[in-house]
Image: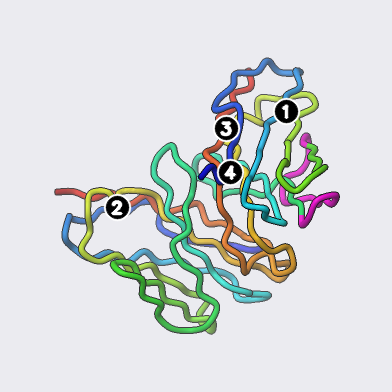
Amino acid sequence: TAGITQAPTSQILAAGRSMTLRCTQDMRHNAMYWYRQDLGLGLRLIHYSNTAGTTGKGEVPDGYSVSRANTDDFPLTLASAVPSQTSVYFCASSESAGGLGRDTQYFGPGTRLTVL
Amino acid sequence: GQNIDQPTEMTATEGAIVQINCTYQTSGFNGLFWYQQHAGEAPTFLSYNVLDGLEEKGRFSSFLSRSKGYSYLLLKELQMKDSASYLCAEVDSNYQLIWGAGTKLIIKP
């Protein structure tokens, strides 16, 4: 079973360039999330989506945008990358959108992004 | 804002027991998760507590005291494969997860 897939696995990006990180889940989960994980810090929520067609801002949304055109896909776009966006990015999903925190979040394998 | 505190690193011996503590701010609390994350991998779910007390799942147990803003993860009969980071996450009043920085557990033979 695939669960959640992310692409690419890793990427080196020049500052100022744009990039889209892809995330696809096959569990028919309603809610999806994007986190970044930096050394010494907890996972920080960038954007989330309670259900297809809706999105919301998390703790660190600046410089990132998302869309949720269907249930399965939740791409994250960096419009103009900066070195501070160097991080490991995890996509996650959970079954229910109503009580977000009460549902277990399942994580993708992550994308390691380096912005130079 | 929310604050999740857990030790940065712990060391334990194979076969022993280790307790990893987590403290959080109690206002707007809606539950607490523990996740395991091996180096270079994704976090995976271990446990969820919303009521006071101990939840046992095989070698792993998780405890919650809501009045004290305190939780711990207890790992018994430690195995080398338990070497990983353990992440504590509080469910806040908006039902978002607020994550601690994680505790890196090193198991020695």
Q: Is residue A68 left or right of residue B65?
A: right
What residue is rendered at 48% in x and 74% in y?
B70
Q: Alpha-carbon neighbours of circle 2 within 10 Å: few (<14), some, or many (≥20)? A: some
Q: Are marks 1 and 2 in contact (CB under 8 Å)?
A: no
Tag 4, which chain? A
Judging from the image, what secondary structure is the residue with disc 4 in? strand
Residue B82 in magenta stretch: no
Residue A63 in magenta stretch: yes
Q: Are marks 4 and 3 in contact (CB under 8 Å)?
A: no
Residue B82's label in the rendered image is 2
Which is more foreground, mark 4 or mark 1? 4
What residue is rendered at 27% in x and 64% in y?
B18
Q: Kindly indicate the quadrant of the structure image that contains residue A46.
A: top right
Q: Is residue A53 left or right of residue B102?
A: right
Residue segment shown in magenta: A50-64
Q: Which residue is mark 3?
A: A111
Cα distance between the residues tagged 1 and 2: 34 Å
Cα distance between the residues tagged 4 and 1: 16 Å
Q: Amino acid at mark 2?
A: Asp
Q: Which residue is mark 1?
A: A20
Q: Which residue is mark 4?
A: A4
Q: Amino acid at mark 3?
A: Thr
